[in-house]
Image: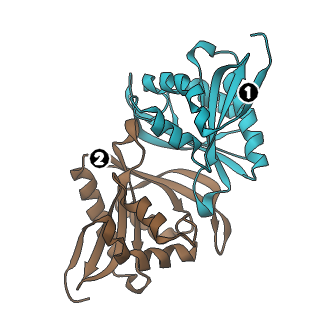
Chain colours: A cyan, B brown
Amino acid sequence: MTGDLSIHAIRPDEFERVWPIFRAVIENGDTYSYPPDMDIETARQLWTTPPARTFVAERNHEVLGCYLLKPNQPGLGNHVANAGYMVSPAARGEGLASAMCTHSLDEARRAGFTAMQFNFVVSTNTVAIGLWQRHGFDIVGRVPGAFRHAQFGPTDLVVMHRML
Amino acid sequence: MTGDLSIHAIRPDEFERVWPIFRAVIENGDTYSYPPDMDIETARQLWTTPPARTFVAERNHEVLGCYLLKPNQPGLGNHVANAGYMVSPAARGEGLASAMCTHSLDEARRAGFTAMQFNFVVSTNTVAIGLWQRHGFDIVGRVPGAFRHAQFGPTDLVVMHRML
């Protein structure tokens, strides 16, 4: 835990640095709908093709977390940002998700977004939902059974939103 | 109105047939978030790249409407279908949207989907919302100001869902 946390954008060709975390998170099949066996090139394309940008949180040159920031929709909905966060299984409980959320809200404001929306938060992920609520997000929707949770089967997704 | 309505899938290289309708609908900036000046190749890619499929509704070889059918998410959310419908401005009020919705629900069931979700229904489009409700959809979410309506400015979007 010594050393300062640095959060910054990476280039597409640096995506290998986040891939171990990305793969570990999607393999669990409990928080993201990405196919658990998705390959790195598909992930790289989704997370780094403009206007999408990937950020990393690192300490002592070790990547501990990453997040995606992009417009939630093109065109007439592109004032609303969308973000997704991943934390290394080895670095849970250190406040990384919270630090990355704060960073993403600032980045989104800087980029001119006026709101942020999460479309697909897994309802059983109550730790994340509570965290996003403390960061100003409201639950604005709930879709029944829209996620096939690896452990729990059909599971609701919630939509969360806040103005910036 | 003479002649039977035929609703069927088209190939990507037939997308020119729906483009006049597609362009007319997005130009209005009141129902879809696509950039009003989006070009045909971007539209073709979004609507016809597998697993997305485009269907047309035609009568006497004239295309009067079209719809998109695809998984709403990849991977662990791909049991939920997503669809979007467009009707030629010249063919409004003839029940085309309703006919295409019924067709899409059948197609979605045939393809193995177990639910359908609309993520971004413009809240001022009350005719469409009422129609989807009559087709079994419920409003399961509402996102404030997420659509920049060409006439009304920031406008809510609603999320609609039904099981299949």
Residue tagged 1: A99
What x and y, as percent, mark residue B73? 42, 44
Residue occupying image coordinates x 26% and y 88%: B1
Q: Is residue B125 left or right of residue B60?
A: right
* Quadrant position of residue A147: top left
Question: Where in the figure is residue A94, as x and y percent of width and height?
Answer: 69, 16
Q: Compare residues A120 and B48 and report the one nearer the observer.
A: B48
Q: Secondary structure at mark 1?
A: helix
Amino acid on which disc 1 is placed? Ala
Q: Are marks 1 and 2 on the same chain?
A: no
Q: Is residue B16 visible?
A: yes
User: Within the image, what quadrant is residue B5 found in?
Assistant: bottom left
Mark on residue B113?
Answer: 2
Q: Judge whether A58 appears above or below B101 on screen.
A: above
Which residue: 64% across, 20% down? A64
- Going by the numbered disc 2, the residue's amino acid type is Phe
Q: Nearer the viewer, mark 1 or mark 2?
A: 1
Q: Position of residue B126 (x, y in %)?
A: 51, 69
Above or below — where is B5 with respect to A8? below
User: Could one spot residue A18 in this view of the protein?
Assistant: no
Q: Residue at x 21, y 52 (%)?
A: B110
Task: Left or right? Give the position of B79 relative to B106.
Answer: right
Residue at 61 percent across and 49 percent down: it is A50
Q: Chain of mark 1?
A: A
Q: In the displayed orientation, state which residue is furthest to the bottom.
A: B2
* Chain bearing mark 2: B
Image x and y of residue A149, in percent:
40, 28
Say which element carries label 2. Answer: loop
Q: Nearer the viewer, residue A95 or B52?
A: B52
Label 1 – label 2 distance at C-alpha: 38 Å
Tell me, yes or no, whether the two marked residues, 1 and 2, touch with CB atoms within 8 Å.
no
**Which residue is the extreme one toward the front?**
A13
